[in-house]
Amino acid sequence: MQNGISVYAGLNTSIEENIALIETAASLGLTRIFTSVTIPEANSTEGSNEFATILATGIANGFEIILDITPETLSTFDFALDFEEITPRLDDGFNPMQIAALSHIRRIMLNASTVNKALLVALVDLNADFSNISALHNFYPQLYTGLDISYYKAQNQLLNNFGISTGAFAASLNGRRRPPLMEGLPTIEFTRNFPTDFTARYLQALGTDFVIVSDSLPTQEECTTIATLNSDTIVLEASITIDDKLLQPQIVSYLSKTFVARTEISPCIIRAANSRDSKNSIATKLINNLTPRKPGDITINNTNFGRYAGEVQVVKLDLPADPRVNTVAQVTNLDTILLESIGSNQAFTIRFV
């Protein structure tokens, strides 16, 4: 995933802090910087010089610069578009002919939150170069104004139907939030005050192609989270629940690999296709279980299940106790939301916390 950070000129971060953030992000392997020239609160005097420094530092460190522009600001910052490393993100106001023309010159990004089918059909009719077009959602500074999850999914599906990849923003929870409101800059309202790590994994689980931290100065931990996000694998945070202290590290080791959900989808459980323990080394150490199972429970079949012994499952619904199935861990409460995204042949891993 080509994930990134946001860097703003003339706001609540010094130029020294911005340069340090860019260099930290580069060292972690992040590849994109989002910046905007349409922020009314930015100090225009300081911002002009800082903006040039941000562009130069980002380009020198190998970043693609996503520059948010409107038709009104396009001419003002026309000089910046001389650099192939800069990708204009076209906010509302550009017409289909302008967009199609730009797509034949350079990479561009559409506003994923507001694009509609009529525009995309018009771009097809105008023979736009869709290989140069991707899309990035808005972020929403004002409380309660972020996107509804169903709307977000529908917008992504619309864009994907035209072969367009999509990106979204994750707010920083523990870093410095951006003015003027400083209440987070999420794409999806639901994620506004959740940890950045969860938001990034949630966006990835929803099929988002790239994620950008939107606030002014995320922590290094938050940057690392974004840098290590894997587009193919959903990560579930969990805690060990089995009481046997000697068996706990063996269970953690057994579960600490990448699993793939079976092709068939059950409404009750997620079955790991590649998990059966042919030697029954774990299954033989598990005693009969008499505890009902609940959503988020991670279970392993014991030897009483015969050839199904050792199979790893994640529970999606309340289920009765089964003496052949042992609950050994529990997905954290927040991460149970991710279970609905683990569909047919989806890779997932369990990260113990």
Image: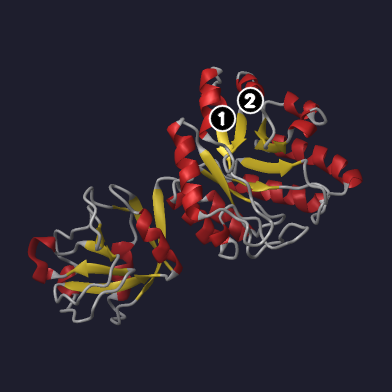
Query: Looking at the rendered structure, which numbered label has been put on residue 136?
Result: none
At label 1, which amino acid type do we have? Answer: Leu
Q: Nearer the viewer, residue 94 or 215?
A: 94
Q: Are marks 1 and 2 in contact (CB under 8 Å)?
A: yes
The mark closer to the camera, 1 or 2, is: 1
Residue to which mark 1 is pinned: 119
Query: Badge 1, how many Cα within 10 Å: few under 14, some, many 20+?
Result: few
Q: Secondary structure at mark 2?
A: helix
At label 2, which amino acid type do we have? Answer: Ile
Q: Percent position (x, y) of residue 242?
A: 30, 78
Query: Badge 2, how many Cα within 10 Å: few under 14, some, many 20+?
Result: many
Rendered residue at 83%/51% (across/down):
41
Q: Percent position (x, y) of residue 311?
A: 20, 61
Indicate the colouring scheme. secondary structure
Q: Percent position (x, y) of residue 148?
A: 52, 55
Q: Nearer the viewer, residue 227 or 201?
A: 201
Q: Percent position (x, y) of residue 235?
A: 41, 57
Count of numbered labels shown in the rendering: 2
Rendered residue at 49%/52% (across/down):
203
Residue to which mark 2 is pinned: 99
Say left or right for 177 vs 169.
Answer: right
Say left or right for 225 vs 314.
Answer: right
Location of residue 136 with respect to 304 vertically, above or below: above
Rendered residue at 68%/55% (across/down):
215
Q: What's the CA distance linking mark 1 and mark 2?
A: 10 Å
